[in-house]
Image (cartoon, rainbow, N blue to C red):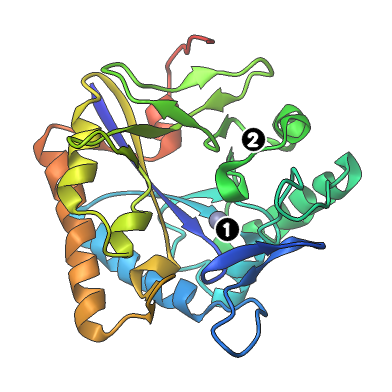
Amino acid sequence: MRRLCFTVDLDRDVNDAVAGSSAAVSLDRGDGNAPRFSSCAEGTEVLIDLLDEMGIRATFFCEATALRRSGMGRVISGHEIGFHGLDHEDFTGARTGIRMDQGAMREAVERGICMIRDDAGASPRGFRSPYMDPDEGMLDFLPEYGFTYDSSRYAYVSPDTDAYLLGNGLAEVPAVKGRDAGGKTVTSYLWPMHEGLRRPEDFVGLGEAVEDGTFVLATHTWHMVESRSGGRMSQERAESNLADVREVLAGLLDAGFRPMTVSEALEGRVLRSR
Ligand SMILES: [Zn+2]
């Protein structure tokens, strides 16, 4: 079976790591780098309308603060809810120079779960680390808080790319990486398409390399209305950006992919470890 998991990172606008702070900032557009949430809110509404139109249930990995500040908890409550940090932390410290200890990571998880449950009405069962850079110690303790899967890693695409079991019982449901027709690396994050650097067929082609397995497609809420390189999109640009996302999803459905949430993709299956 071809399973398609459309996953959305709901996080602060154009987030960036800075030295000296575990929490992320928003890219400075001339007014400083305090976190902003307006593109996150607008982009979420755009995506929810598209998903409703196409009858797709997605998985939203929520940064708890962005969920609260954007006011999108009720809006996404029909979809699967995952966790993407309390303040979009750099948990490993690779970017900020601040390595969070276990106590600080547990506090972020506990506070984040409470906020997400209050806002979206469900406790997260899945985790995606900010920057796709999970801390191993954190993955080890996540099952204690009811988590059943992680989606913070890439797997090189193959005909049977799928979820697998981590040592602690969590399922790993990786995003996908491969090469395009020209031999360049392409991942299942739509980021370069939103920036005008790739076309929908690049991502449909990557998905089609999965013949029997799970294709995890990923994007960010804010990227529906704001690009990193170009700032806020014009109405025309936002519409063509939306049309591109629709084209990717439609192309994968045409290829026989069945859309489902990550939990649905894992349900009732015995996974292999690797
Ligand atoms: Zn993020």
Q: Which residue is situated farthest in the bottom direction here?
A: 31
Q: Residues within 10 Å of mark 2 (few under 14, many from 20)?
A: many
Q: Quadrant of ligand 1?
A: bottom right
Above or below, 104 relative to 161:
below
Name the residue tied to disc 2.
Answer: 147
Which label's residue is closer to the chain start, 2 or 1? 1
Residue 263 place in picture, x, y as percent: 45, 34
**Residue 121 circle label:** 1
- Residue 2 appears in the rendering: yes
Residue 135 place in picture, x, y as percent: 72, 36
Look at 61% across and 45% down and name the residue there. Answer: 129
Q: Pick the residue in front: 81 or 20.
A: 20
Residue 159 place in picture, x, y as percent: 26, 17
Kind of residue indicated by mark 1: Gly
Residue 150 quadrant: top right
**Residue 70 circle label:** none
